[in-house]
Amino acid sequence: MRAGPRNLITDVAGLVVGNAQDAGLRSGCTVLTADRPFVAAVHVMGGAPGTRETDLLAPDKLVQEVDALVLSGGSAFGLDAAGGVADGLRAAGRGFAVGDIRVPIVPGAILFDLLNGGDKGWSVNPYGALGRAALAQAGPAFEIGTAGAGFGAMTGTLKGGLGSASAVLDNGLTVGALVAVNALGSACVGNCAEFWAAPWELDNEFGGLGAARAYPAGAEPAPMKRMGEATTIAIVATDATLTQAQATRMAVAAHDGMARALVPSHTPFDGDLVFAAATGARALPDPVADPFVLGHAAASCLARAIARAIHAAQPMPGDLQPCWQARFGA
């Protein structure tokens, strides 16, 4: 396994990502889309999720493919970002055909960043416009760290952010991850610079600090953020041909990466969720073994993407938490 050329989820050929954010709002959104619909699935393990159109991602539902996936800040207000993306896709002639009408299928998930110090006194919900702006920016290259859905994110100890990573597997398949990290838990060990995800790091992508130093096995972490100010939302993707059921299993396995990179994770106060996307560009070389390999790769990519989000976050005036670079970058 090696990182792809960009070390972004867009190393999965055909996928593009766009970010939009508002510095005054201290929030934003991120959209993943492609030039044609793709298979998608979801698995939720957090206790406080906020979602749009996730029920239709079950394998027994009519629609098996989607036009885009959206990650957004803004709590329930941020669900409007997916509506903005849907408006933009419809204007482009995209969507599920119902007679002569096109209905874009755009599932989304949100994180809670309403108490991060930004100006939330809007008279018109801003997230629809942010969603459409993110779609307009979609391309193979995009910013991580303080960007998009992770623009106003925080974690248990350090400023959060948007992360991404990719892996090219020995069987020729590509896997990628995209994540907005706003966790109740921490990506770093105690008050140290080392990341919990260090054993899965490739090419010193988040500092090359090595495995975390000794940590008491019996430690009982207390929530560092105020309860209700949490959630890590992610997308894992591959160029493999997967059914919706197989994509669901990849999303389930990817949650292992979240648990490797954030301590604690999947708490009652987090809305932790993973979407899975499969473009279908490459057949599975081994239909029995390869779904197992894809699950492992998705978990590893997600762990790396989480650490990269924290590592890349940048300081801004009014921050309520320090960022990793300001504290440990030197």
Image (cartoon, grey):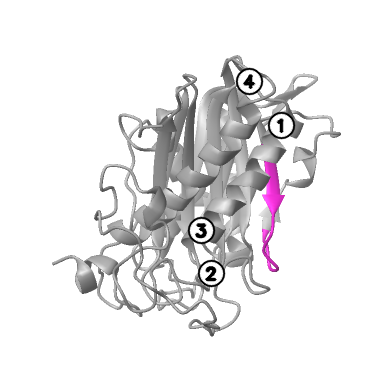
User: Is 133 left or right of 323, judged from the image as shown?
Assistant: right
Residue at figure coordinates x 35%, y 30% from the top left: 4
Which residue type carries mark 3? Arg
Q: Position of residue 150 (x, y in %)?
A: 42, 58
Numbered disc in front, either 2 or 1: 1
The earlier-in-sequence mark between 1 and 4 is 4
Element under label 4?
A: loop
Q: Position of residue 156 (x, y in %)?
A: 45, 76
Residue at figure coordinates x 51%, y 61% from the top left: 73
Residue carrying label 2:
123
**Label 2, residues with CA under 10 Å away: few <14, some 14-19, many ≥20:** few
Marks 4 and 3 close (CB-CB < 8 Å): no
Residue carrying label 1:
246
The earlier-in-sequence mark between 3 and 1 is 1
Quadrant of the drawing holding the N terminus: top left
Marks 4 and 2 close (CB-CB < 8 Å): no
The earlier-in-sequence mark between 4 and 2 is 2
- Per the rendered image, the range of residues in magenta is 41-50
Numbered disc in front, either 4 or 2: 4
Q: Magenta part mainly helix, strand or loop? A: loop
Marks 1 and 4 close (CB-CB < 8 Å): no
- In the rendered structure, find residue 241 and report the number of the disc placed on it: 4
**Label 4, residues with CA under 10 Å away: few <14, some 14-19, many ≥20:** some
Q: Nearer the viewer, residue 71 or 23?
A: 71
The earlier-in-sequence mark between 3 and 2 is 2
Which residue type carries mark 4? Thr
How far apart in space, not on screen, are marks 3 and 2 (Cα)?
A: 40 Å
Residue 198 visible in rendering: yes
How far apart in space, not on screen, are marks 3 and 1 (Cα)?
A: 22 Å
Q: Position of residue 140 (x, y in %)?
A: 37, 31
Residue carrying label 3:
260
